[in-house]
Image: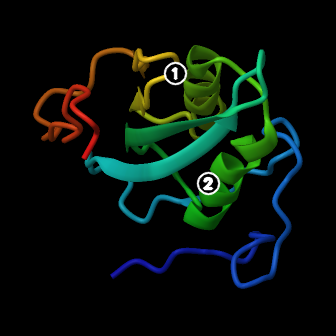
Amino acid sequence: MPQTDVSNLSMLGQQTETARTPEEAVLEKVPNGNPGTDYVVRFTAPEFTSLCPMTGQPDFAHIVIDYIPNSFLVESKSLKLFLHSFRNHGAFHEDCSVYIAKRLIDLLEPKWLRIGAYWYPRGGIPIDVFWQSGEPPKGVWLPNQGVQGYRGRG
């Protein structure tokens, strides 16, 4: 079984502060212990929070990130803190969703990545945002993200 080198990580095993903004948040990566094998990694953040840039009121989303690693994996604590940094950040749903995906693309250079951001209603209308980096490699099992269209999101 491959060992993952974590010697260059600054947050894992440490008490860390949440960044004030997503731009200041540090995302860390670790080597992929299974290079040459195509598989899907999924992160689900059912309690994502940001602020409406117009009213300052909180916005909530259920975010699902799927990616097929290349040479690196995102370190999960750094991802959690990155997502938490949006809590006091004002941005539209679309901007938050695509920014998360692009930061991960820049960090990891994965073979493929998609994000499904299922936002709870604002003004009575839910806004769902979907983005992917292109076509996934052939033969990889891509499960459904499992979040139904808005019906109370329960």
Colouring of the image: rainbow
Q: In front here: 145 or 128?
A: 128
- Whether label 1 touches label 2, CB < 8 Å: no
The type of residue carrying mark 1 is Arg
CA–CA distance in space, label 1 to label 2: 26 Å
Q: Which of the 4 quarters of the picture holds residue 142?
A: top left
Dot 2: within a 10 Å radius of its alpha carbon, few (fewer than 14), some, or many (20 or more) residues? Answer: some
* Residue 54 versus residue 35 in the image, above or below: above
Left/right placement of residue 64 relative to residue 136 reads right
User: Where does the image place residue 49, in percent across and percent down from the top left?
Assistant: 61, 43
**What residue lies at 69% left-to-right and 58% top-to-bottom?**
81
| Pointer 2 residue | 79
Give me the disc on residue 122: 1
The type of residue carrying mark 2 is Leu
Q: Which of the 4 quarters of the picture holds residue 132?
A: top left
**What residue lies at 69% left-to-right and 76% top-to-bottom?**
12
Report the number of numbered marks.
Answer: 2
User: Where does the image place residue 32, in percent across and percent down from the top left?
Assistant: 47, 58
Q: In front here: 140 or 56?
A: 56
